[in-house]
Image: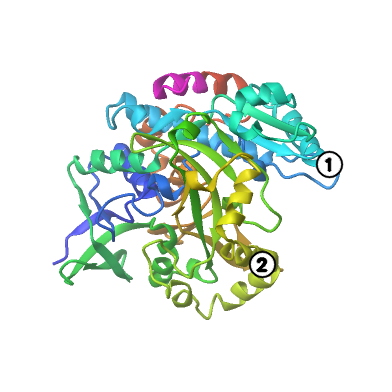
Amino acid sequence: MIPLTDVVLIGAGIMSATLGTMLKNLQPGLTIDIIERLDEVGAESSVAMNNAGTGHSAFCELNYTPQQTDGSVDITKAIKIAEQFEISKQFWSFLIESGLINSPEEFIRKVPHMSFVWGSNNVNFLKARYDALTGHHFFNKMKYCEDPALLKEWIPLVMGGRDNNEKVAATKMDLGTDINFGALTNNLIESLTEQNGVKLSLNSEVTEIERRNANWLITVKDLKTGANKLFLSKFVFIGAGGGSLPLLQKSGIPESKGFGGFPVSGEWLVCDNPSVIQQHTVKVYGKAEVGSPPMSVPHLDSRLINGQRKLLFGPYAGFSTKFLKKGSFLDLFKSIKWNNIYPLVRAGLDNIPLTRYLINQVKQSPDDRLQALKNYYPEAKLTDWKLEVAGQRVQVIKKHPTHGGVLEFGTEVVVSRDGSIAALLGASPGASTSVSIMLDLIERCFTSQVQSEAWQMKLKNMIPSYGKNLAQDAELAGKIRLYTTEVLGIG
């Protein structure tokens, strides 16, 4: 007799950790099994070196504010992402105040977010972006500067050795953050597994997911012994990063049909010269090359990883047929099914510039990478930097009624009709908006419970703005931001 559990979370990353923590707070009596194929939690996409660590709040990410043909700047996506990050900060503040995770210094710190551009057209764009954003209360503390002297104070590495006649501009938001999502994930999983009814299985790979009447039967292989173990669950969440698509396909639900994946790898240049590292204390984002994926927006970042100050530049994009950094080169080929061939072909034909861009990135020499770095740090020396592999991401390809198939760069939550199984596909902005993504999932999969008075009260306790629109309520947004800034120590 296979014991029945309430919830199975596949993948022990930031998404599963967030969902498990939220559900356990909403209904403490839930039994939860967390299944992870690696020998530690948060080691694939959540670990610090595998992601940008930026608290994505649209303060500096220029790809969230596209320029229109008439020269205006669309800030719709920036507002949405900024609100989602404010929701994440509320939940993290609740966890701190409830004693469910340790001090905020372990996973979040204040690091100003800046955008930097050069050339008349780009400067005009940045000024238009600044004017559009500062009209909204999320961004009204943003600063804009074209003065080289002041910019040299803000970003000495970026301005040192630069042509004085070059037209440059930057924006700055002091409320920006740097987040170690690996540390946050470890804190959440540790807190979860200390509670009754929660079990963590490491070195455990899901090989089958099949419907068993109203429940789900999950076959798991112990990677140490080779033995199989069976789990029977009322609800399953597939939060396995790039590995989510193959597992979703195994479920056989109709909603999984037509989905494909396009893997993109990345690399960082990491500085190991302390005298250089200490001169840069902000995150500086620039404009992406034409045809490049959003995760390849160049940025020069001050990071704190495992207690050590780091300086990273990149990411340099690459291509691998793996869906996970520690996956198989056969992942992409195994994901191709009859129901997603046409969307894959159509999306491929529509994204030839992206393919060309990735090929050029793969062919880059060390001098090519150094030249890209010098756009943001003109006096950079290759001897101060080493190349390290970043995380692997799988972008979503899905059916489209007119185009046949489209490549998307956001996240996609796929839910079965009865809400008994859900999967998270895609990447950016991902971890920063994990709380909003999981809230949406809970509302779709636990509909009757969410409508209960008990869950409503608990949701509002976890997220004070729940049910309200921070993007439209400037007064409430201001109060919430003051609260989270104080609790998280990022003021």
- The residue drawn where x is 19% and y is 40% is 195
- Overall secondary structure of the magenta stretch? helix
Could you say which is closer to the camera, residue 484 or residue 361? 361
- The residue drawn where x is 51% and y is 23% is 481
Q: Position of residue 38 (x, y in %)?
A: 28, 58
Q: Tell me if residue 345 comes above or below residue 162 in the rendering.
A: below
Residue 81, quarter of the rendered image: top right
Q: Is residue 20 left or right of residue 362?
A: left
Which amino acid type corresponds to the residue marked 2 in the rendered image? Arg
**Is label 2 in a helix, a strand or a loop?**
helix
For disc 2, the neighbor class at 10 Å (few under 14, some 14 to 19, many from 20) is: few
**How many tags in the picture?**
2
Membership of 488 in magenta stretch: yes
For disc 1, the neighbor class at 10 Å (few under 14, some 14 to 19, many from 20) is: few
Q: Which residue is identified by label 2?
A: 356
Query: Seen from this angle, which residue lies furthest right?
Result: 70
- The residue drawn where x is 16% and y is 65% is 2
- The residue drawn where x is 46% and y is 74% is 335
Q: Is residue 123 left or right of residue 109?
A: right
Which amino acid type corresponds to the residue marked 1 in the rendered image? Gly
Q: Position of residue 279 (x, y in %)?
A: 52, 29
Give the alpha-carbon distance from disc 2 to disc 1, as whole Å: 27 Å
Q: Position of residue 326 (x, y in %)?
A: 36, 63
Which contiguous range is marked in magenta? 480-491
Membership of 353 in magenta stretch: no
Q: Position of residue 44 (x, y in %)?
A: 37, 54
Residue 55 visible, this orientation: no
Residue 1, quarter of the rendered image: bottom left
Residue 19 visible, this orientation: yes
Q: Which residue is identified by label 1?
A: 71
Counting residues from the start of the chain, the first of labels 2 and 1 encountered is 1
